Amino acid sequence: LRTYMKSSITQIERRFDLSSTHIGLIDGSFEMGNLLFLAVVSHFGAKLHRPRLIAVGCFLMAVGAFLTGLTHFFMGRYKYDTIIQVFQNDSVHITACADPLKTEDVPDIQIEESGSNMWIYVFLGNALRGIGETPVTPLGISYVDDFAKAENSPFYIACLQTITLLGPMFGFLLGSYCAKLYVDIGYVDMESVTITPKDARWVGAWWMGFMVSSALLLISSIPFWFLPRSLPKQEGDKDRRENLDGTEDALNNNHNLKLTDIAKGFLPSLKRLLGTPAYFLLLCGSILKFNSFIGLFTFKAKYMEQQFGQSASRANFLIGVLNLPAVAVGIFLGGLLMKRYKLSLVSGAQLSFATSFMAYLLLLLQFGTKCDNIPVAGLTISYNGTQSVSYNREMLFSECNRDCSCSAEEWDPVCSDSGITYISPCMAGCISSSGYGKNTVFHNCSCVSASYPAGSSTSVRLGQCPHAKDCSRSFTSYMAVSVLSSFINSLGATPGYMVIIRCISPELKSLALGIQTLVTRTLGGIPAPVYFGALIDSTCLKWSIKKCGGRGACRIYDSAMYRYAMGNKCESRM
């Protein structure tokens, strides 16, 4: 479910007309929910019935997902600015250089007024999911590790983490499917929708996945209620059996302990934990690594959309079928290596470091693959064809449209045969049009005729021009390096986990994993999406303007600056 949220980032951003900084804050609310209870649950949970605490967590996540999806039904129908909404006849005629949305015959539509603050419920639902996820990882891993042989524990934990990745894979594939469906599917005539999934205004059925996830989480919580408080111990080395005997005796004695008695031991346990040098160093390393990981992972699908011209659906699908299986295989093989060669703590730490460093080098190579900006008149190219990136709205106007009644705020792109995109038919200087809906073609466009020799086509078709053909080869290279980087990085995940577990006392395992999750999410999970989002916003060339005032979502970015900002920030955190 957490990955489904990330796969829906673009859809939510456009539906609520938010900036990337704003959407990063919403995404970080999951970690905010974790922050409230993680340390307490990790400490108390080790002394209580861990499977039932996990069941309660699954139920809370189901409620949070339902609340998030329910937001859709309290909002009005999604509307977007386009002249095709105004003229629905088989053949339309546009007054020369006029902006139809500004004429007196068309009422002023307040598009997002009714749902302008509804994003708060998405924020709260995501925070509630964060609270529910709190007991799952620290209690689940410590539950398995307590009752397994020392040499088998890494393998079991690797299997557990590998199986757990089926959820993220399902989340991205579900996000891919929902992104293809129009947000108001079943309520509108799809023939009247003039935008495609590759359009910057397209919003998929983001809410549908949250409803499906809510039902699945509710069902998955049921088996945990029937698991025992402790499992039969496997045969193992003497020292470990003695430790486990002590741990189980403590668990049995805790049946009669009050919460106040358990709470008294929290601060001393925390002091012992942070006083372990190996654990403290691993914690600091995790913070830096998690910052770059969470920021990049949150906006990975969006990066693929903006840099390589992929639709949100295709980007999510490729992450789900290529990147995540590579991660699953890497985690599984990492655990298998520890079991097969019986790696010591030092060897496990060395393996974890080596894989992280190799993944960092591959990350640098990822950002070396690029696609040029789409030629957009007045933004990435001048009207006479000169390459020139501009953040100045005055550059949107030229001699060919200077006397027209165009608005610099509109975004209804059209594509000429030369491959140049104009932000609207009006900005292209078009006089008339033919066709209907997605097949609308605009004719006699003065800005097109001014840029190219007499006799060439002066018509433009509805929609943004695609990326150049060589961009497909760059994208293939990007995905190959990305998959390899995911595999190598995940290869050290299980050894890293085992180093944390083995370098501290057995009774502190749940607290150690909980504190690690708490600190990395607090110092990485919450701020990283926000400052990565702010960096992305700084590369925006054209913002949408809400009908009732204020800046909305970004329509197009400077690809070169976008790539540099993401790559540079990741490098500074690795």
Image (tube, helix red, strand yellow):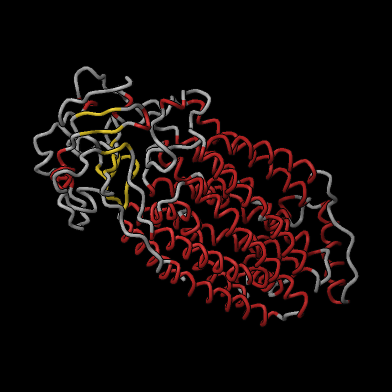
Asked which quadrant contains residue 126, the reply is top right
Q: Seen from this angle, which residue lies furthest front?
A: 455
Residue at the (73%, 80%) spot, across then down: 343
Left or right of 123, for residue 117: left
Q: Nearer the viewer, residue 194 or 170?
A: 194
Whole-percent x and y of residue 192? 41, 25
Q: Is residue 378 above or below residue 532?
A: above
Left or right of 450, for residue 120: right
Asked which quadrant contains residue 486, the reply is bottom right
Residue at the (28%, 49%) spot, across then down: 419
Whole-percent x and y of residue 365? 44, 71
Count the marks.
Answer: 0
Q: Seen from this angle, which residue lies furthest top?
A: 105
Q: Nearer the viewer, residue 301 or 352?
A: 301
Q: Is residue 116 above or below residue 498?
A: above
Q: Nearer the viewer, residue 156 or 275?
A: 156
Left or right of 456, for residue 185: right
Whole-percent x and y of residue 95? 17, 25
Q: Is residue 574 above or below residue 71?
A: below
Residue at the (55%, 54%) spot, across then down: 318
Whole-percent x and y of residue 143? 77, 59
